[in-house]
Amino acid sequence: MISDMKRDIENLEDIQLVVNTFYGRVQKNNLIGPIFASRITDWTPHLEKMYRFWQTILLHEHTYSGSPFPPHATLPVEQEHFDTWLGLWEAVIDEFFEGENATEAKRRGKIMAQLFHYKIDYLKNHPQMKPLV
């Protein structure tokens, strides 16, 4: 009997599946796709950075260093953009995985969306402030 039970995110290949599928859908999305397209012309370095980021967060394999917010600080985005981003992120995870790391990936995505939205909104309303690099 073939099981249709999903397993948890366990390794780099799992993270690559999530990240590649997610960003493939982002690029096709009418709302957020054009924003990404205006900033990213070569997806390979971005995807590789995202693999390292999520590998560090979910698998505790410290391959990412840096600050994820500064490249996003001046994006022309509002709540609907973050809602779309998060909806795509959670849908991809739910499509392939379930378990502790999958739940953590969704939780971290939600926290990042909220935090990034708050910071971007703050910078829009306080143009004299400069984002930390």
Image (cartoon, rainbow, N blue to C red):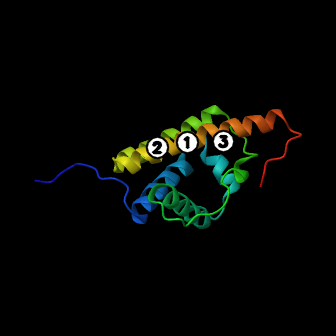
Please, is residue 74 above or below residue 126 in the view?
Answer: below
Task: Give the residue at mark 3.
Answer: 116
Q: Which mark is residue 130?
A: none
Q: Nearer the viewer, residue 63 or 98?
A: 63
Query: Residue 71 at what x, y percent from top left?
Result: 71, 53
Instruction: Give me the residue at 44% from left, 55% from top.
Output: 18
Please, is residue 122 above or below residue 102 in the view?
Answer: above
Task: Give the residue at mark 1.
Answer: 85
Q: Earlier in the sequence, mark 2 or mark 1?
A: 1
Residue at the right extreme, as displayed: 128
SS for dot 1: helix
Instruction: Give me the residue at 63% from left, 65% from top.
Output: 42
Please, is residue 26 above or below residue 125 in the view?
Answer: below
**Which picture quadrant has residue 16?**
bottom left
Query: Residue 29 at what x, y percent from top left?
Result: 55, 44
Task: Give the residue at mark 2.
Answer: 106
The number of discs equals 3
SS for dot 3: helix
Spatial CA distance of label 2 from label 1 is 11 Å
Q: Earlier in the sequence, mark 1 or mark 3?
A: 1
Amino acid at the residue labelled 3: Phe
Is residue 130 toward the left or the right of residue 100 in the image?
A: right
Q: Crowdedness of circle 1 by 10 Å Cα count: few (<14), some, many (20+)?
A: many
The reply to whether residue 25 is visible in this rendering is yes
Query: Residue 70 at what x, y percent from top left?
Result: 73, 52
Spatial CA distance of label 1 from label 3 is 12 Å
The reply to whether residue 30 is visible in this rendering is no
**Which picture quadrant has residue 9?**
bottom left
Spatial CA distance of label 2 from label 3 is 15 Å
Is residue 2 toward the left or the right of residue 30 in the image?
A: left
